[in-house]
């Protein structure tokens, strides 16, 4: 699951990079282009970080503890006699 998220973040980074290039050609203000650059870099760093921790979460885990079965239901109460 983390590896899928990393792939989605990489796709988002490509979109942000495209937007940054488009902002350059549209001559948007420098702060907008810098924000897009920072967002692109941060997104790629997040994806790289997920690649590093992803295998730790996909390693085989201990089997779940065996719980005792729930207690048997109490016997139903008899309804009072109808009059």
Image (spheres, rainbow, N blue to C red):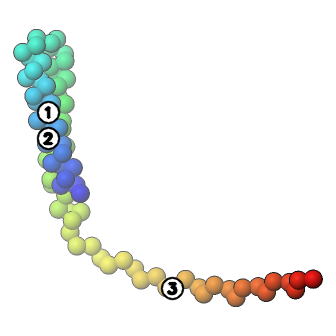
Q: Nearer the viewer, residue 33 or 76?
A: 76
At x 10%, y 28%, the residue is 18
Residue at which label 2 appears: 11
Q: Give the side of residue 75 with respect to residue 59, left or right.
A: right
The image position of residue 17, as x and y in percent, is: 10, 30
Q: Residue at (32%, 78%) from the top-left corner?
A: 63
Check disc 1 and report the residue beneath it. 15
Q: Is residue 10 above or below residue 77?
A: above
**Distance Cα–Cα, label 3 vs label 2:** 47 Å
Asked if residue 18 lies left or right of residue 32, the reply is left
Residue 59 spot, x, y in % from top left: 20, 69
Q: Are marks 2 and 1 in contact (CB under 8 Å)?
A: yes
Q: Which corner quadrant of the image does residue 2 belong to? A: bottom left
Q: CA distance from mark 1 to mark 3?
A: 52 Å
Picture residue at 7% right of the left edge, 23% below the top:
21
State the residue lying farthest toward the front: 83
The x, y position of residue 41, in whole percent, is 14, 34
Per the image, label 3 sits on a secondary structure element best described as: loop
On the image, the x and y values in percent for residue 26 come to: 10, 13
Contact? badges 1 and 3 (CB < 8 Å): no
- The mark that comes first in sequence, 3 or 2, is 2
Q: Quadrant of residue 40?
A: top left
Q: Which residue is mark 3?
A: 69
Q: CA distance from mark 2 to mark 1?
A: 6 Å
> Which quarter of the figure is the N terminus placed in?
bottom left
Asked which quadrant contains residue 38, the reply is: top left
Horizontally, residue 71 falls left or right of residue 24, namely right
Residue 50 in view of the camera:
no
Badge 3: few (under 14), some or many (20 or more) residues near its Cα, within 10 Å? few
């Amino acid at each position: 699951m983390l590896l899928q998220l990393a792939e989605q973040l990489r796709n988002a980074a490509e979109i942000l990079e495209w937007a940054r290039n488009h902002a350059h050609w549209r001559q948007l203000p420098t702060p907008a282009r810098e924000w897009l650059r920072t967002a692109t870099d941060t997104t790629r760093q997040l994806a790289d970080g997920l690649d590093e921790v992803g295998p730790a979460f996909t390693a085989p885990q201990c089997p779940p503890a065996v719980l005792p079965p729930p207690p048997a239901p109490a016997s139903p109460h008899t309804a009072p006699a109808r009059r």
